[in-house]
Amino acid sequence: MVLGTVLLSLASLYVLYIVIFSAVKDGIDKSEVGKLLKAKYGVHAEKNPISDDEIEKVLEDEFKN
């Protein structure tokens, strides 16, 4: 009985977190300040991950020189 109550409480808090997070993120994106910041600084694109092989190749080239 107690375990069910604890699990239900945790699930409720998680759902509440998701709802608040989505609302705040959506609110910032649609607000005038959010639009102004995007216009001034631009939207940062996600960085492309660099593979370990590419890093090793660059380091080997630097050590050869």
Image (cartoon, rainbow, N blue to C red):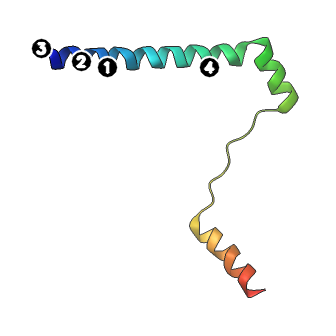
- Furthest residue in direction front, as rendered: 2
Residue lying at 64% horizontally and 69% vertically, measured from the top left: 54
Q: Which residue is mark 1?
A: 10
Whether residue 10 sits left or right of residue 32 in the image: it is left
- Above or below: residue 39 compared with residue 61: above
Q: CA distance from mark 2 to mark 4?
A: 28 Å
Q: Which residue is denoted by mark 2 in the rendering?
A: 6
On residue 1, the disc is 3
**Contact, mark 3 vs mark 2 (Cβ under 8 Å):** no
Residue identified by numbered label 4: 25
**Residue under the image location 66 percent in, 51 percent down:** 48
Q: Tell me the element at label 2.
A: helix
- What distance separates the C-alpha of mark 1 from that of mark 3? 14 Å
Which label's residue is closer to the chain start, 1 or 4? 1
Query: Mark 1 is on which residue type?
Result: Leu
Q: Nearer the viewer, mark 1 or mark 4?
A: 1
Q: Quadrant of residue 40?
A: top right
Number of the label disc, if any, that sits on residue 61: none
The residue nearer to you, when weighing 33 against 6, is 6
Q: Earlier in the sequence, mark 3 or mark 2?
A: 3
Above or below, 50 relative to 40: below
Front residue of 48/1: it is 1
Image location (x, y in percent) of residue 8: 26, 15
- Estimate the spatial distance between the alpha carbons at disc 3 and disc 4, rounded to whole Å: 36 Å
Q: Are circles 1 and 2 on residues that touch, CB within 8 Å?
A: yes
Q: Residue at x 15, y 16 (%)?
A: 2
**Label 1's element?**
helix
Q: In 3D space, how far apart are the residues under numbered discs 3 and 2 (Cα atoms)?
A: 9 Å
Is 42 situated left or right of 59 in this image? Answer: right
